[in-house]
Image (cartoon, rainbow, N blue to C red):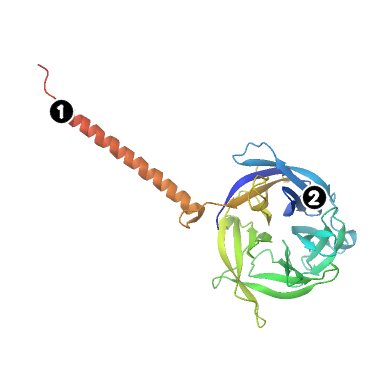
Amino acid sequence: MAWEEVALTPGFWGGSRQGIAAAHLGGCEVAWVLSARNNLTRASVIPWKTSQPVAGGRLEVLASTHGAAIPEALALQGYDHLGDIDVATVPGANGRVVFAAVEDDAYAKPAVLAFSLEDFTFLGVPALLRQQSHAPWVAVREEAGTLVAYSSEFDAVTRIFRYAMPGSLMGEGASLQAWELDLPEGHPGLMRIQGGDFAPDGALLLTSDDASQGRPIYTLRPEGAARSEGPRTAAVTSTTETFYDAEMEGLTLLELPGGCFPPGRLHWVGGSPRSYSGELNIHHWREAATCGGLGAGGAAAIAVLTLAVVGLAAALGCLVWRRRRSSAAGKAPAAP
């Protein structure tokens, strides 16, 4: 799967950027939620003029936790760092809920926190992520009537962990069988994973801040049916290098009806390499047009090759014309 940028929403952020989620409220209306280390912000994105070669947007902040998203009781236990977030509908919880991965200062007891989408009222700790020490992201979906949280380590990722969360959003949750990534023998695992979200077809997309690999976006797909006797495996079916020149963070997947802003289907958060640490950019991407299944890179290469062949043909045509003109001049009859 190849992606291309179709819009960019720059904005200034009161704290380090961490993640993004989106809740489609109907029509063109969307609640965009952004996370920082200890902050949650709900905003709308409206069209705006920019100097970028793609469409531009602007953030309008609607609600914020003002730097105090993590409840004091949890902060006293060392929790100090939100990660990427997700939004899901929870029956009995007044609609949509924001789920945030959270880490403690010792990286020993990561968890998932739940907040109301409307005003970020804290609703509980629906899962303790006992299978891992880091929790840079969380993605939530319903499976057989149960809300399941997915997450991973930050580095050397060879598993995607799964946790069943209680509908009351209060409790430790239950560890489920992890997805084992189908990687080549000796592979160290995916590195610097910062965000994740599910596509409607069940694929799990992850952002990576691994500059040595081009800061890629990975697409994972589970293989076969879940087995009671062992973990499910998942294959990395595509890798798209973004070559972004600043830190990549969380992502969310949302495609709005035609004519709505912003366009695109994949939206991810990154820093700005040209300004101070408070600035973020929301990148809005869509699937790139492909040429014979070669992807955007292959299509671009073919386009360049085609231009080169056309240029060579033109040069040869010009050379032949000049030689014919010269030959004709040499055979012209002498003047009387």
At 64% across and 75% down in the image, what residue appears? 232
Quick check: 336 above or below 48?
above
Whether residue 72 sits left or right of residue 135 in the image: it is: right
Residue to which mark 1 is pinned: 330
Residue at the extreme right of the image, as rendered = 73
Q: Is residue 101 visible?
A: no
x and y, in percent, of residue 42 in the image: 79, 50
At 80% across and 50% down in the image, what residue appears? 41
Quick check: 71 above or below 59?
below
Q: Distance between the residues labelled 1 and 2?
A: 80 Å
Q: Image quarter for residue 188?
A: bottom right
At 75% across and 74% down in the image, what residue appears? 175
Q: Which of 80 and 41 is in front in this view?
A: 41
Whether residue 40 sits left or right of residue 271 in the image: it is: right
- The kind of residue tagged 2 is Thr
x and y, in percent, of residue 182 in the image: 58, 71
Whether residue 13 sits left or right of residue 302 in the image: it is: right
x and y, in percent, of residue 120 in the image: 84, 55
